[in-house]
Image (tube, rainbow, N blue to C red):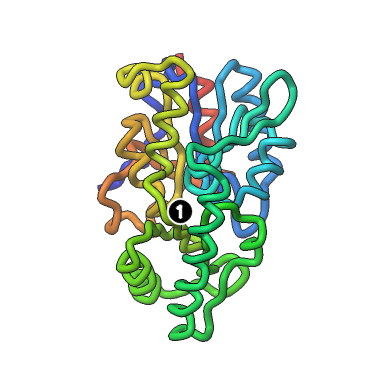
Amino acid sequence: MNSQVTDLSPNWKDIEWVLTDVDDTLTWQGQLPPETLISLQKLRTAGKKVVAVTGACAGWGDHIAQLWPVDAVLAENGAVIMEKKDGFLTMRSDVPIEDIRNTQQRLKVEIEAILADYPDLNLTLDQAYRICEVAIDIGQNRPKVDSETVNQIVARIHALGASATASSIHINAWYGDHSKKDTATAFLKEKGLTDQQIKQTACYVGDSMNDQFMFELLPKSVGVANIMHYWDQLQHKPQVVMSKPGGFGFAEFTEKLLSVK
């Protein structure tokens, strides 16, 4: 199936909330294109609310929430919510931070034991800035790891009773029931949206396997062009796919969204 389209259908005019992944959705090849920041600002100028929903570490989420033109960041796959209120950044979590840190340390030891069987792999360089998760680098600061190896490691983490997802650059693992989908749903309901309004007025932009349940949550969903690399593996697919990759595809989508009449 080829979902690439030239224009969005008229019902996209109802979109008030743009939720988006970050790595390889707003970035591309490890860089943040200036087109991305311009597009984020265009969305906010047009009155759209922009929320980054990412597996990125809390430290990176702090940077995004502080400096980028976004309304909130749901970091570490929904473990923490960073949002400016009255001009000041706030951070909160549905799970007590100390409990999160205790389970994170246990999981780190368990994953390091798994990685003993994969001597070429390491935890991410930003592990020290993670509050909840343990993350393995599978393509950020090293050559891409083959999908069979990634699937093996994810399965072994699941066998521990932990959650794990693979993005284009990381395997993210954590103990707890939170997820991008659950935290995004709770966040939007906190803003007063009903289930029906969430589906009508919110959309999601993503690029990888760990975005598929957000594609399921929000029927108005978008893949940047590099989503096609995972197309046959996706259980839930985006409604439309842009012709450009990463942040360039996000900029392409922004222009299409803002031109819907």
Residue at image location 46% in from the left, 39% down from the top: 205
Residue 251 visible here: no
Instruction: Bin the neighbour count of mark 1 within 10 Å (Cα to Cα): few under 14, some 14-19, many 20 and up.
Output: many
Quarter of the image for the C terminus: give it.
top left
Q: Is residue 211 visible?
A: yes
Name the residue carrying label 1.
Answer: 226
Percent of width and height locating residue 178: 41, 44
Closer-to-camera residue (245/96): 96
Query: Is residue 22 placed above or below 191 in the rendered structure?
Result: below
Q: How many marks?
A: 1
* Label 1 SS: helix
Residue 133 vertical position relative to residue 260 in the rendered view, above or below: below
User: In the image, what residue type sits under mark 1?
Assistant: Asn
Q: Position of residue 124 (x, y in %)?
A: 59, 66
Q: Residue at x 33, y 43 (%)?
A: 213
Residue in the image at 60% along x and 59% along y: 29
Counting from the top left corner in percent of width and height, residue 227 is at 41, 52
Residue nearer the viewer, 102 or 48: 102
Q: Residue at x 71, y 18 (%)?
A: 86
Foreground residue among 199 and 88 = 88
Q: Residue 148 falls in which quadrant of the image?
A: bottom left
Q: Is residue 195 above or below residue 222?
A: above
User: Which x, y percent locates residue 57?
Assistant: 60, 52
